[in-house]
Image (cartoon, rainbow, N blue to C red):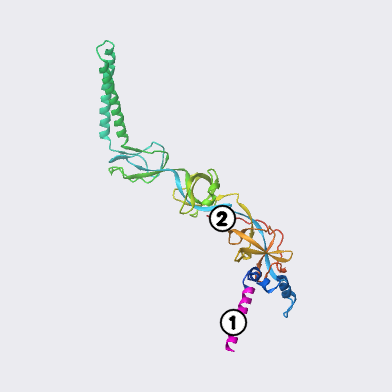
Amino acid sequence: MRVLKQIILCIAVLAGTGYLWLTYVPGAAAFPERSGVTDLLGIRVGAAEASESGGGGFGPRGPAQVVVAAVTEATANDRIDAIGDLRALRGATLRTEVSGEVVAVALETGGFVEAGAVILRLDDEAERIALERAQLMLEDARGDVARLGQLQGTGAVTEVRLREAQLAQRTAELAVTEAQFRLSQRTVRAPFSGWLGLLDASVGERLSPSDTIATLTDRSEVLIDFRAPERIASRIAPGMAIEARFLGGGPAAPLTGEIHAVDNIVDPRSRTLRVQGKLPNEGDRLRAGMSFAVTLRFPGDRLVAVDPLAVQWASEGSYVWAVRDGKAARVGVTIRQRDADRVLVEAELAPGDAVVTEGVQSLRPGAEVAVANPPEAGLAAEPPSRSAL
């Protein structure tokens, strides 16, 4: 008798658990039909639904009350947002080529300099003496060549002697060139036009080639480096327009520029591609190192969008309940993009269709529904799309 009571108790617990599962778990009600239990017991789903709605000791239940939302149309993957850092169009760290004592600083710190302008000079007295000596030797060698050339016509000078004099002249010319080069190494000049940074040198200081004098930048235009996901690598090309907005609380209006260059490899660790944009620097407001939010826009893919509450899950994947001719229809969906207020999907849905957002627990395929909030016309308008890196 005790064993019989335990068996009856177990059956009651299992029956109660099954009832709760079939009632409150989305998609569970269709499990008996998919697993073949209804066929094994000889139960027809249509008959069971009819008995639920029209027969039984509890009276007719009527159509399920649901709340719906209209399906809209939107664009996916139509933009990416990234963070980029500015750098000058050109930049150089100025250093001396040789060691020496600073005898003159020609420019003020922070000003604009033209290409070739003298930044500072090192002590060059020894180099000037060497250049003068080389010039004297060259002058003497040229005189020998001229004199021997006149005597060659009389036969007093051999061809070999003249060639030796010409070789000595060429050697003297090279000595002058070398002396001029060594003298030029004592002067630091601007390699291009730009803005000079803080000078870290003063008269009387001794510098070596490893010492930094200043930085020179050409920021007439600025470059912005950022990274884009590999999925859009084939859609990015030089010349495409970009928008950049300063992250430091500057002007609200974004700057408009273009893509200057695209790297030829994808980083295997981050799966991103390095992209370099170019922005105008009107008014000289931009500086290297500033951070900007960069936006690139694309044509994108046209998809239908549903309310996030409408998306349900089952063992075979995601789906929504659509209301068609007053009855519930289960429609499978493939999620392409999820936003805070909508989900972009691929599905057999059209803009303006109604999908259930509340009351999905009691729905069955083909069950009659009563819509508490019929969707209004014009709800299929497209809201703005978003897609971030």
Considering the whole magenta stretch, tell me its main secondary structure: helix
* Residue lying furthest top: 154
Residue 91 is situated, as x and y percent measured from the top left of the image, at: 41, 43
Q: Which residue is mark 2?
A: 387
Relative to 347, does residue 2 appear above or below in the rendering?
A: below
Apparent side of residue 326 relative to residue 382 in the rendered image (left or right)? right
Kindly indicate whether the residue at mark 1 contacts the one at mark 2 (C-beta within 8 angstroms): no
Few, some or many residues within 10 Å of mark 2 (<14, 14–19, 20+): some
Instruction: Give 247 or 147, whichever is nearer the viewer.
Output: 147
Residue 137 is situated, as x and y percent measured from the top left of the image, at: 25, 25
Q: Indicate whether residue 21 is drawn in magenta.
A: yes
* Viewport quadrant of the N terminus: bottom right
Apparent side of residue 288 relative to residue 207 in the rendered image (left or right)? right
Residue 248 is situated, as x and y percent measured from the top left of the image, at: 48, 54
Q: Which residues are magenta?
A: 1-23
Apparent side of residue 126 relative to residue 379 in the rendered image (left or right)? left
Sooner in the amino-acid sequence: mark 2 or mark 1 = 1
Numbered badge on residue 74: none
Relative to 115, does residue 319 appear above or below in the rendering?
A: below
Instruction: Give 290 or 84, whichever is nearer the viewer.
Output: 84
Q: Indicate whether residue 48 is drawn in magenta.
A: no
What secondary structure is marked by label 2? loop
Whether residue 280 is visible, yes or no, is: no
Apparent side of residue 174 relative to residue 375 in the rendered image (left or right)? left
Q: Amino acid at mark 1?
A: Cys
Numbered badge on residue 10: 1
